[in-house]
Image (cartoon, grey):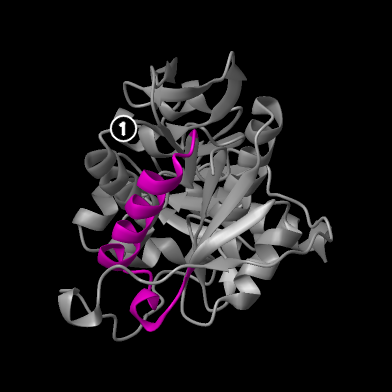
Amino acid sequence: MSGVWVFVENRDGAINMISREAIGAARLVANDLGKPLTGLVFGQSVAGVAAEAFSLGVDAVVGTDDATMAGGRLEAIGPVMVKLAQERQPDVIILGASTRGRDLAAWLGADLEAGIVAEAIEIKVDDSTVKAVRPVYTGKLLCQTFVKGGLQIVTLRSRAFAQAAPTGKTGTPEWVPAVVGEDAIPTKVVGFEGKGGKVSLGDASKIVSGGRGVGGPEGFEPLRDLAGVLGAALGASRATVDAGWIPYEHQVGQTGKTVSPDLYIACGISGAIQHQAGMRSSKIIVAVNKDPEAPIFKLAQYGIVGDLFAVVPALTNEFKKRLN
């Protein structure tokens, strides 16, 4: 089985948003190559996930439905994918650049001695080669990258691609046995604990983020109010996390989360290059800062020079009027 493979990451019986985006991008690549698209589904009791993958446009589903796959452990999934790739020789494997997707791409690249293009924000096919555009130098430049010869592995940045739409397609998945037994897997998943705000940073279409200018833990309260009105996630700069004002789960930047929302509102954030590396691909950036020389204004499409403790509540009240 050659063609294009896409890793279908899932949790609680549903396909993750980043894999919906990966399926949409992989479908276009498969069409351009004139090759079939295969979804790779792993987990426990994931027949529904396989059916959803078919509905989103894959031509075939191959995977493992087994207790060892519960929790998405890399040590269980990696060996199965390597074995499948060695036996069936896909042309391209596409994964979402989630934590699991990045780890799995590295596992595959090492065991299959294949090249990897990481964090693609655009993708196209040129003479049977998948060429991807990815940011470099903390997002200051974009470069076109591709794997020369052999298996091509590509990870896609979250929210850089449109999600696959339901097509109504159906099919019968092919289930293969696990490669590694439970006793040989060193990690155990005992549960998941949600952290952060009501909206996940990685999935958020809107983010309200705070920096050193909030002044302390209590300074995030006006930002939480604005985020609540907008249905946005709450972000933060590294300085505020290091100061203990807000948990690490909220950190955006080079050493935090990389996000690409439709709207990013930066409040009291100067715009150091490390922070820009995590959010500069946002579609619309609004900066609120009392320093008119703050670097964030060079990146933002819209800027408000003023005290965030006056500006943010005013924005919150105005959005309440317009959105209710």
Which quadrant: the C terminus? bottom right
Which residue: 65% across, 52% down? 315
As shown in the figure, which amino acid type bears the numbered disc 1?
A: Ala
**Where residue 166 sits in the image (x, y, percent)?**
79, 57
Q: Position of residue 227 (x, y in %)?
A: 58, 61
Choose top left, top right, bottom left or bottom right for residue 26: top right
Principal secondary structure, stretch drawn in magenta: helix
Quadrant of the frame with the N terminus = top right
Closer-to-camera residue (218/56)? 56
Q: Residue at x 57, y 27 (%)?
A: 123
* Front in this rendered view, residue 104 or 202: 104
Q: With respect to residue 215, does 172 lie above or below?
A: below
Magenta-drawn stretch contains 70: yes
In the visual, does 35 lie left or right of 273? right
Where does the magenta region start and end?
Answer: 64-91
Residue 270 in view of the camera = no
Please name the residue shown 57% across and 46% down the image: 22
Q: Is residue 201 above or below residue 263?
A: below
Task: Classify residue 120 as left or right of residue 295.
Answer: right
Question: How far from the left and from the top, in percent, is residue 221?
Answer: 46, 67
Q: Which residue is mark 1?
A: 114
Q: Secondary structure at mark 1?
A: loop
Is residue 29 visible from the viewing direction of this image?
yes
140 in relation to 211, above or below: above
> Where is residue 36 drawn, in percent x and y?
65, 41
